[in-house]
Amino acid sequence: MIVDLILDRKDGQQYKAANFYCEVMEYAEFWPEEANPITKAMDEGNDDDVRSALCAYIDRQGYKPEIKDYINSVQWLEDDPKPERHNLATVATAAEEKGETIKIGGFDTFADFMSYYRAHYRPILEQLQQDQMSIKDIHLLRFFADDMLSAFAEDDD
């Protein structure tokens, strides 16, 4: 249902206007009276027109009117911006340069963790990524899992 597409976006699913349009178009075959006003607004109108068409759909279907608050709070003709991604090493290094202490598991500093990671974890991960591990290397995976669990064990403080 079209309302599910709206609620998926509200719940954090990445929104792409073209995908939304196509998914609404799929409903047009069976429910043209519901889908066509929305796609027409997307084709010929602006965001306010799309919002009006979506809100009218919510009203016609008798869905909770609170959904309209969300509909009116976002853009419908533009994709959501991609979430900002951060490299852990860059962020932690910048934080430590500001005098913040980054403690990871049993490591007192991020630098200690990275040193350990480069010596022990990275070679195992590279072998896995390149699919160079055989069944006889399972002990490396056990080491990795056991070590990660102990390194990141939660303190009771």
Image: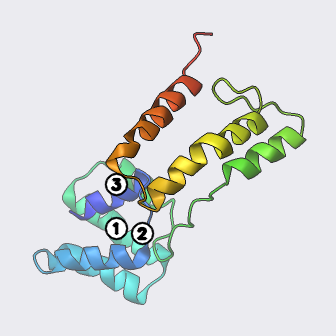
Q: Residue drawn at (77%, 31%), measured in percent from left and top?
A: 109
Q: Residue drawn at (71%, 42%), measured in percent from left and top?
A: 114
Q: Residue 32 vs residue 90: left or right?
A: left
Name of the residue lying farthest toward the bottom: 44
Q: Which mark is residue 7?
A: 3
Classify the position of the N terminus by image quarter. bottom left
Badge 3 marks a residue whose secondary structure is: helix
Pointer 1 or 3: first along the chain = 3
> Does 123 sit above or below residue 143?
below
Badge 2 marks a residue whose secondary structure is: helix
Pointer 2 or 3: first along the chain = 3
Q: Is residue 101 visible?
A: yes
Front of the two marks 1 and 3: 3
Mark 2 lies on residue: 51
CA–CA distance between discs 1 and 3?
Answer: 12 Å
CA–CA distance between discs 2 and 3?
Answer: 14 Å
Given contact means CB atoms under 8 Å apart, are the residues at marks 1 and 2 in contact? yes
Q: Residues within 10 Å of mark 3 (few under 14, many from 20)?
A: some
Q: Which mark is residue 54?
A: 1
Which residue is nearer to you in this view: 82 or 20? 82
Q: Residue 49 vs residue 53: left or right?
A: right
Badge 1 marks a residue whose secondary structure is: helix
User: Where residue 148 appears, x then y in whole percent?
Assistant: 53, 32
Q: Is residue 58 visible?
A: no
Q: Residue drawn at (47%, 28%), measured in percent from left and top?
A: 146
The three-letter code of the residue at mark 3 reads Leu
> Does 27 sit above or below residue 150?
below
Name of the residue lying farthest toward the top: 157
Which residue is nearer to you in this view: 41 or 118? 118
Classify the position of the C terminus by image quarter. top right
Q: Residue drawn at (39%, 70%), measured in percent from left and top?
A: 52
